[in-house]
Image (tube, helix red, strand yellow):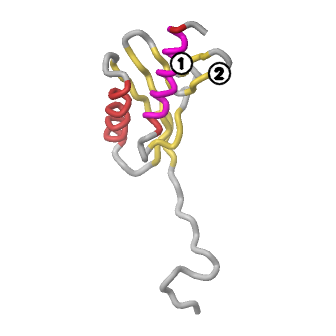
């Protein structure tokens, strides 16, 4: 692996890790056509596409916060890793998480009938 390829591989992995730091991000996504990815020797970083001047990140997020706020948070976190490149964040999907049912023994502090 060349030095440049190694540096880009590490950068793609650091960008992916930064994007996943957001509590609103469930996963990264390569997008509907699978185009948001970085190919590495023997591996692919899905959800991160690097160019000389830009970074594109595709994310799947939890429902709840305003989506522009989530995208701005992810953009800011990723921009700290790549301050010399523009960062584009695409919300590829939104997941609605349903609360889990209380256990059969009942919720704490509740009397059982």
Q: Could you tell me which quadrant the C terminus lies in?
A: bottom right
In which image quadrant can residue 101 be found? bottom right
- Position above or below: 55 against 80: above
Question: Outermost residue, right direction?
Answer: 42
x 31%, y 40%: residue = 69
In which quadrant will I find the N terminus? top right
Mark 2: give few (<14), some (14-19) or many (20+) Cα within 10 Å.
few
Instruction: Between residue 105 and residue 33, name the one nearer to us.
Output: 105
Rendered image: mark on residue 23: none
- Residue at point 43% right, 29% down? 90
64 versus 67 height, above or below: below
- Seen at 40% across and 28% down, the residue is 89
Q: Would you say the residues marked 2 and 1 are in contact, meaning their CB atoms lie under 8 Å apart?
A: yes
Q: Which label is found at residue 9?
A: 1
- Locate residue 5, reporting x and y percent: 54, 11
Q: Position of residue 18 (x, y in %)?
A: 43, 34
SS type, badge 2: strand
What secondary structure do most residues of the magenta stretch adopt? Answer: helix
Residue 14 colored in magenta in the image: yes
Closer to the camera, 18 or 109?
18
* 40 in relation to 92, above or below: above
In this picture, which residue range is highlighted in magenta? Answer: 4-18
């Amino acid at each position: 692996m060349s030095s440049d390829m190694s540096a880009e591989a590490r950068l793609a992995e650091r960008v992916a890790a930064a994007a996943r730091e957001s509590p609103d991000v469930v996963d990264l996504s390569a997008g509907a056509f699978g185009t948001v990815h970085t190919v590495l020797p023997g591996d692919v970083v899905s959800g991160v596409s690097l160019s000389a001047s830009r970074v594109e990140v595709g994310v799947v997020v939890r429902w709840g916060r305003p989506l522009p706020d989530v995208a701005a948070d992810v953009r800011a976190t990723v921009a700290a890793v790549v301050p010399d490149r523009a960062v584009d964040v695409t919300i590829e999907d939104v997941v609605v998480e349903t609360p889990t049912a209380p256990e059969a023994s009942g919720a704490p502090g509740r009397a059982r009938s």
